[in-house]
Image: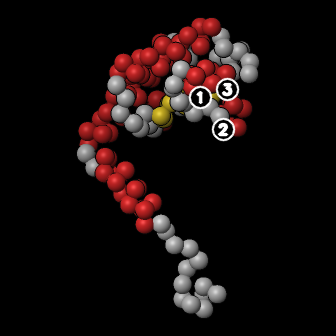
Amino acid sequence: MYEMNDSIPYSHSWNLIYALQEALKRFEDEEAFEKIKEAYAYIEQAITTMGLKLVSPKDHAAQIVLTIQLNEGQCSKAVGDALALQGYIVHYESAYLQKNNWIQIACLNHYKERDMRRMLNCLQMCVLKKVLLT
């Protein structure tokens, strides 16, 4: 049917394309990328100070998302749920993250240092308390 009409079987929503265009405007300035790098470095240093390991070696990591290997005896779902209850959304619900006992922290938004510090304090409390099984 579409071929006979020299058409394609779908069209894009103008509203979605416009929303994407507006969202991408914030990345037109190099300052946005500097803030992402700063947030990544701040969180990375705090994570390693806690004794947690990052999955990707520093030389191979994209400075956007930190993937954190939780220690043995800890549960990524339980830690993620505990952080969510405190208002901090980290990535942990995907099957592959839970299978590997990983959580991910994205650095794409602009976060105030105090908010990052509070989230990291909550994460550290989970690690120290050994938030265990689901």
Local secondary structure at mark 2: loop
Residue plotted at (60% across, 92% down): 4
Residues packed near mark 1 inside 10 Å, few (<14), some (14 to 19) or many (20 plus): many
Task: Read off the residue under disc 3.
Answer: 77
Q: CA distance from mark 3 to mark 2?
A: 9 Å
Label 1 sits on residue: 103
Which tag, 1 or 2, sits closer to the chain's start? 2
Residue at 38% x, 60% y is 18
**Where's the C terminus, which quadrant?**
top right
Q: Do callouts 1 and 2 mark residues in contact (Cβ within 8 Å)? A: no
Residue pointed to by mark 2: 94
Say what secondary structure mark 1 lies in: strand
Q: Which element is circle 3 on?
A: helix
Residue pushed farthest right? Answer: 133
Q: Alpha-carbon neighbours of circle 3 within 10 Å: few (<14), some, or many (≥20)?
A: many
Is 57 displayed left or right of 33 in the figure? right
Residue drawn at 72 percent across, 32 percent down: 99
x%, y% of residue 20? 40, 56
State the CA–CA distance, disc 1 to disc 3.
8 Å
| Residue 40 rendering spot, x and y as whole percentages | 41, 29
